[in-house]
Image: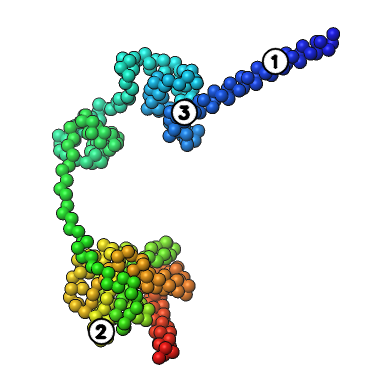
Amino acid sequence: MQKDIENKLLKKENQKLEKEIKNLKKEKLKDRAKIEFLEKRMPSCMNLSKEQMKIQTSKKAWKNDAYNIIFYDNSVELNLKDKCKALFVNYSNYAKWKIKYHDILSRGKTTKLKRKYNKRAIELINKFTKLNGASGARNVSSWITDNHAVNISYKIVNELRNNKLVKLPKIKRVAKKYTSQRGNVVPDLIKKDFKSQYNFHKIGLDGSYLDLIINGKKTKILGEFAYNWYNRDMIAYNFDFSENSQVVSKTIMDIINVVSNYKVDYSIIQMDRGTANTSNIVKNIIECYPNFVLSMSEAGFKHNAPTESLNGWFKECFFAEYGNIFLSIQEFLNKFDEFIIKRNSLQTYIYNKKRSQII
């Protein structure tokens, strides 16, 4: 008798456990179906955090989109209530929405939210137009804030103008005349022939940035460097905060002044095709000196290899000796002058020694 009672109790417990397992399986399947439903219908929300999801799902736009998706969805894996849960909307609110927009939905169309604008904002924008005429949205917004103590975002002003809800014409802008400098580009005379036949035959010119700390602040300074490819000396250099036609033209004039002290038939100044190098200022300088010819590399680095490598080498040597921390820009300039004098004299000594060994 006792065994029979125990068996009955065990059967009942087993049945309860089986029911619980079935319910858990159903819930898991439902959860999976909800996730799949959400992934397919609104994939953009899957990467959002819980807090972001709360903010997103509380918006009217989300609810309106969710209602439209649920109404036109034909899948049978989930019932209407589960679909509402999957898209984080209330079922009773969905039912009210369906009744409210019955006419639109019966025509197979989706509902769209109509933004409500403040009537006061429309009045003030129209008032501004009467007084000032055409203007930008930011000017309108600041005028309303200053004169009427009402905050209206410039984005709202633009929306109202684009939707033609206010009389605010746009400013007619006159297009600026743009003269292209690409006509100043000259062919690459050097290509891959980096050997110089004589002193100052080929000169490489290029800009390179130096990362410095001036008076405790990080500073990026551009150095426009010119090298004599014959003996690898740096013959001219200037600094600025960006590569522009002024720093390039100044460096070219320095090159001309240095080379003019020697008897040279003609010199080729090799550079890239940047806007600073193709400026009219540079073109006009070269036209005044017939014994100097410009050459512009076709593909940047590979046609200006000696200059690029010398830039890196000189910078590395300078930072190794002096570091990159200076009290002022003037201190940096003084140290760089000192470095170039030492480096060029050493470079000349090495070059002459190698030449004497060859001879």
- Per the image, label 1 sits on a secondary structure element best described as helix
Q: Residue furthest front?
A: 192
Residue 239 visible in rendering = no
| Crowd around label 2: few <14 · some 14–19 · many ≥20 (10 Å) | some
Specify the quadrant of the image occupied by residue 28.
top right
Residue 231 visible in rendering = yes
Q: Going 81% across and 10% down the picture, which residue do you hit?
A: 4
Q: Is residue 358 above or below residue 333?
A: below
Q: Is residue 77 above or below residue 40?
A: above
Marks 1 and 3, how far apart in space? Answer: 34 Å
Q: Is residue 263 above or below residue 88?
A: below
Expressed as whole percent of the image width and height from the top left, the position of residue 221 reads 36, 65
Q: Amino acid at mark 1?
A: Gln
Q: Where residue 15 is drawn, which disc sits there? A: 1
Count of numbered labels shown in the rendering: 3
- Per the image, label 2 sits on a secondary structure element best described as loop
Q: Are marks 1 and 3 in contact (CB under 8 Å)?
A: no
**Which of marks 1 and 2 precedes in the sequence?**
1
Q: Amino acid at mark 2?
A: Val
Q: Amino acid at mark 3?
A: Leu
27 or 258, nearer to the observer: 27
- Per the image, label 3 sits on a secondary structure element best described as helix
Query: Dot 3 corresponds to which residue?
Result: 38
93 left or right of 185 in image:
right
Tell me the quadrant of the picture where the C terminus can be found.
Answer: bottom left
Q: Going 50% across and 21% down the picture, which residue do you hit?
A: 77
260 left or right of 235 in image:
left
Q: Going 39% across and 15% down the picture, which residue do you hit?
A: 96
